[in-house]
Image: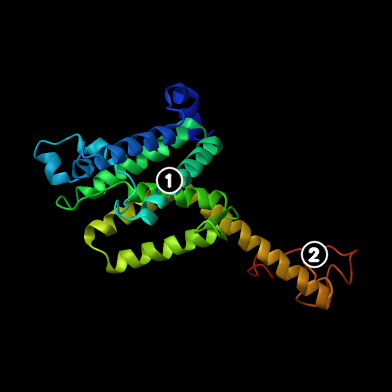
């Protein structure tokens, strides 16, 4: 039983179900309040220097910062419900796959890594963008063939969008500011923390599958290959199946 399984059995009852929905409700409230002039979105950005200066609420409120849009652009505003719907779809899918506790831990780890990365560049503002990015990458890894209607028209498999995201992350690591680099590393670190072992196992499985396929194709062309061959007389387990083949302990396996 893994550590996460043990935690799930002991602490599962303390998990917050539907946490994605609560985050979206908070973001909708903040966005509408800011649109009406009741709140200042700048108060919902994580700036470590301001946290040290007496504004500790930013360690939490940055989670409710809405997706960045231009309030004067109707096209940008139309994108906002779509962004929330995608986040809800992916977040709830991860919660159903993992269970509430593991999904809570995934988000919590992302938050902790994001805050830690932010303090490496204390003057730079940070939002929840890369936390949402880690949710997207996690969903894409688990559901690579899921199709999204790009611009509500063009169906695209999410694995290609994830590939674009990885390329953008790589570009950001090369050309971005140090704050951007730390945030990318935090997002990628969160993803690898939960999927690293699975990725390694998948790569090993694919390597073995390719080796079996190559051997099968070779046998189709040249016939089955012997597993054992005598280095003295050349007999094999195929030409002489009645013979026993043994290995010399002093001849490096020959």
Q: Is residue 215 left or right of residue 128?
A: right
* Quarter of the rendering containing residue 144: bottom right
Q: Which residue is mark 1?
A: 81
Instruction: Please tell me whether mark 1 sits on a helix, a strand or a loop.
Output: helix
In the rendered view, would you say 76 is above or below 13?
below
Residue 75: where, in percent of width, then height? Answer: 39, 56
* Rendered-image quadrant of the N terminus: top right
Judged from this view, the residue extending furthest toward the left is 53
**Residue identifier under label 2:** 245
The residue that appears at 27% across and 58% down in the rendered structure is 180
Is 225 situated left or right of 74 in this image? right
Residue found at x 35% / y 43%: 110
- The residue at the point 39 percent across, 32 percent down is 22
Query: Residue 165 shows which numbered tag?
Result: none
Position of the C terminus, as image quadrant, is bottom right
Q: Residue at x 53, y 52 (%)?
A: 141
- Would residue 133 be visible to someone looking at this image? no
Residue 54 placement (x, y as % from top left) = 10, 36
Task: Judge the density around disc 2: few (<14), some (14-19), many (≥20) Cα neighbours within 10 Å.
Answer: few
Q: Is residue 49 above or below residue 204?
A: above
């Amino acid at each position: 039983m893994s550590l996460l399984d043990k935690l799930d059995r002991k602490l599962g009852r303390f998990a917050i179900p539907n946490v994605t929905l609560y985050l979206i409700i908070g973001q909708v409230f903040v966005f509408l309040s800011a649109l009406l002039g009741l709140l200042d979105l700048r108060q919902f950005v994580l700036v470590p220097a301001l946290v040290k200066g007496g504004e500790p609420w930013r360690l939490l409120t940055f989670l409710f910062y809405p997706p960045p849009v231009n309030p004067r652009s109707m096209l940008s505003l139309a994108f906002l419900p779509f962004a929330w719907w995608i986040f809800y779809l992916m977040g709830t899918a991860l919660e159903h796959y993992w269970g509430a506790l593991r999904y809570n831990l995934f988000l919590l780890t992302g938050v902790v890594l994001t805050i830690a990365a932010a303090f490496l560049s204390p003057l730079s503002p940070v939002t929840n963008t890369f936390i949402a990015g880690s949710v997207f990458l996690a969903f894409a890894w688990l559901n690579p063939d899921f199709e999204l209607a790009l611009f509500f028209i063009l169906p695209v498999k999410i694995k290609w969008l994830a590939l674009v995201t990885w390329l953008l992350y790589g570009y950001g690591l090369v050309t971005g500011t140090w704050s951007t680099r730390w945030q990318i590393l935090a997002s990628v670190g969160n993803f690898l923390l939960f999927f690293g072992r699975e990725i390694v196992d998948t790569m090993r499985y694919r390597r073995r599958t390719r080796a079996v396929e190559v051997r099968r194709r070779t046998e189709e062309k040249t016939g089955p290959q012997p597993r054992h061959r005598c280095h003295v007389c050349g007999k094999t387990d195929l030409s002489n199946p009645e013979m026993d083949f043994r290995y010399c302990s002093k001849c490096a396996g020959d």
